[in-house]
Structure formats: C-alpha cells, structure tokens
Amino acid sequence: MHKKVRWLMLLSAYDLRRSFRRNDTRSVRASGRSRQEGSFAAKRLAVLIMRYVRIRAFARGKMVLGSTCHALSVCVAVAILAGCGGGGGTLLSPSLTGLTAERMRPGVVYKSLYSFDGKDGGAPYAGLLNVNGTLYGTTYAGGANCRSFGGCGTVFSITPSGKEALLYSFDAKGKDGGAPYAGLLNVNGTLYGTTYAGGVNCESSSFATGCGTVFKITPSGKEALLYSFKGGYKDGETPHADLINVNGTLHGTTVYGGANCTSSGACGTVFSITPSGKEALLYSFDGKDGEYPYAGLINVKGKLYGTTYRGGANGYGTVFSITPSGKGRVLHSFGSGDGVGPYAGLLNVNGTLYGTTYHGGTHGSGTVFSITTSGKETVLYSFKGGSGDGASPAAGLLNVNGTLYGTTSNGGSGSCLLSSYALGCGTVFSITTSGKETVLHSFKGGTGDGRYPEAGLINVNGTLYGTTSSGGANRDGTVFNISP
C-alpha cells in the first residue's frame, strides 16, 4: 500500500474505528441483548466494511463486484461479532431470505440519466437540489483533485435531461473541505453545504484529515470556505447532513464532537451558522438523549426536529426536538420492535412527522414510522427485505400529493449482493400515510443501472429524481429519474 494514508480509506476506516469503539459491537457482547440487535450490529458493520472495501478498490482504480464485497464484509463482521462458522446460526435476519414476490406498480417509467466516471465525481451519497430547473448535488469521492486518494469529492450540476457539469473539486488542503456526504441548500441563489472532513484547526486527535467544514458555492462554481469545525468538546466534528435555513440563519448537525459523552467520546451536536460564517454550538448530545445525529433537521413552527442513530433509553436511537436557543427534548426512544437506528431525517405532513429507521421492525430490515410533535409514535410499515421488498432505508421521505416516496439502500430483486443473504441493490418505493407500501423500482446494479441509493428523492414537475452511490456504466454512481 502507498505509504501515504489514502483519503477515502482513512475516512471509511475512521467510521469503522468509531463503530468498534462505540456501540455496534456492544450489542452482541452485552448480556441479555436480543438476536435482532446482533443482526443489527452485524449488518451495520457489514455496511461499513463494504464501504471500506469498495473505496479501497476505487482508490486503486479497481472495482469490487458486489457479491465478492458483500461476502467478505459479512464474513468479517460476523467473525468480529461472533466468529465465522462458530455455531449459533447466522446473525443476519432469516427474514431476509426466501422472499420472491415483487410488488411493482404498472406504468412506472424509470431511467438512468447519468453515470459518474470518477473524474467528474464518484459515490453520490446525497440527494439533489432543484434551482430554476437545473439540479445540483455533491459526490463523496472523485473529482480533479486528490486523484491518488480516489478524489476528495465534487459539486456538480445536471439538467433533467442528463447533461452533467463538474462545478468544483474539493482538495481537502489548507482551507478546503473534502468528502461531502450532504446535499446543498439554496439561499438567495447561493448554495450552502457541508463536508465530512477537511478544513483547518481540528482539535480531535482521532481524525487527522480534518473535522469537516461548512462551505458556500455559486451555481457557476465559485467556492468559499465558511467554517472549519474544531472537534473535541467545544465544537462539533464531521457534519453528515444537509443544512436548513431558519430566518436567515443556517442550522445543522455533526455526528461527533460536543461537550458530553466524555467517557466514550463526543456524541454529536446541533449547531447554527450565519451565511457569513459565524458558528455557534447549540446543543451537545450525551447518549441518554441520543448520539450520532447523522440526519439533518426540519423546522416546524419555530422548533427544530431530528433523529439520532443511537442512544436514548434503549440505545436504538431517538427522535428529538430542540428550540433555536438550544433547549433539547427527547420525543421518542426506539425499542427494536418499532425500529432501530434512524439514519434519515423527518418529513412534516400537516403537523405529523414521518421518517425511516435503517434496521429493526418486524423483519429487522427497517421501518417507516410517524410521530406527533408531542412524541406519539406509530410504525406504519416494516420492510421485509429479500427480492420482494426493500431493506435498510438510509434516506428520508418525499411527500407528493399525500403519498410518500423514498428509497432503500438494499433489498429488491437486483442481485448485487451475496444471494444467500438476499440484500439486493436497493429500491424506490411509495407508501401511503396509512402504511400501504409498493415497490416502484428494484435497482439492478452492474453497468446498466445504479445500486445502493442512500439519498432521498426530489420532485420536478411530477418526475422524481435521485442518486445511487454506486453502479452505472463506470460503477461510480448514477443520477436517475422515475415517473410513478
């Protein structure tokens, strides 16, 4: 291996190290924990390891086939948590196998619009933003800079017909960020976003590549750094989600950093920042009220609402509210049966909030839920996984005329992953607010279609647009549209 630590390998290895250090291995080692939580831990570690393997291959100019990558990932995850071949059965939920009846709505039109090639971007984990008919987005990898590391990420534009333009390549040097997981926010014609790494003045000893940044960029590609997170206990570290605009001030979350959780490292923060770059730490999670807020915030009547991936009363994640002045409250702590690990943010539909969990539910493959602003939660749907349904929704939901639309990062009839686990390449689905779900598209992967969508959808004149983090002609991810 090259002596210099590869950029994206370092990022994914960092996520793995965080996972091992914190809660993901705790689930099967603690006494009295359920088999479902063991399944959750194995699948989460498998996803992290799979990302590491794919990024390592990408950095070397190669690609790992999904089945090979997943076989290795699952074996390593199971070996870490329970031991490969060590009796006691599989840690992965048996409900993920044997489902073959696909429920797809007739008349759905799907099209893969664009395939990234690495040089113009790779691994678009974020969704798209519509600005006057042109779509804007980010890629976590690829671009003109950091080529020996697989690229530090990009900002791009694309027309609804599929004409793409590279606007900016991050270089993660000096005052620039790198590896943007999040999408963009439009404020008066200027786009704002975050990068997971890069920047200056990072006080965290565990992340040598920087603690992440907030940046702005014009639609023509002129970029400027607004803020570099410092990490440690006085500031946030590694922002993962989109920003929101509340009366001219931007608000967001960081996965790590903050004043609390001193025994196991910082649990994440909520912050505000002005368009000129003045940042304020509003809230630090302490574990009991949640930890690791991967998702962004929504504003409902002046109060902010969001989710945390772990923490809370049961350790499975929370829904929380916070005032603009920083007073936080836990609305709901997930308890395995109603979902585990909400990775995505919330959607407000007439005062009721809707969201997804990455794991948990009846079949262990994730859920769609609703919750009132006072904290009354209801499971609307439990994903079944396998070839007939989606699994592991990493993104939030979109409301189109009272029907909700979303993506799952696994599941469906595509055969990207190891067939014995039947995790699939991901899906696009619709669901009513009463819980009736329909698979609209199963991603096939390979060179003809994308795979592993981790972002939500946007609506442009009745056509839905989204991204896949991998797959496509060059296997570096795609932009697609679907007309339901």
Image (tube, helix red, strand yellow):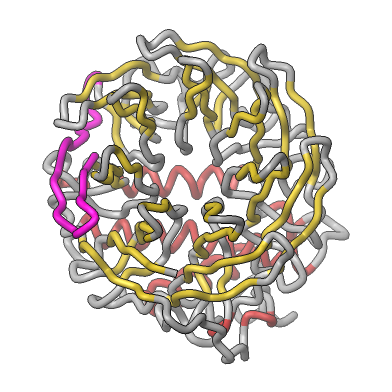
Q: Is residue 374 magenta?
A: no
Residue 12 versus residue 453: which sits nearer the camera? Answer: 453
Q: Which x, y percent locates residue 190? A: 28, 24
Q: Classify residue 123 by image quadrant.
A: bottom left
Residue at 29%, 59% (x, y): give it.
Answer: 479
Which residue, as the protein is rendered here, is positioned at the far right?
A: 32
Residue 447 is at least partly visible in this image: yes
Q: Is residue 170 magenta?
A: yes
**In the image: residue 255, left or right of residue 159:** right
Q: Which x, y percent locates residue 54? A: 33, 62
Residue at 49%, 28% (x, y): give it.
Answer: 244
**In the image: residue 34, left or right of residue 422:** right
Q: Which x, y percent locates residue 129? A: 35, 42
Residue 108 versus residue 326: which sits nearer the camera? Answer: 108
**In the image: residue 201, left or right of residue 139:** right
Residue 262 is at least partly visible in this image: no
Magenta span of residues: 155-175
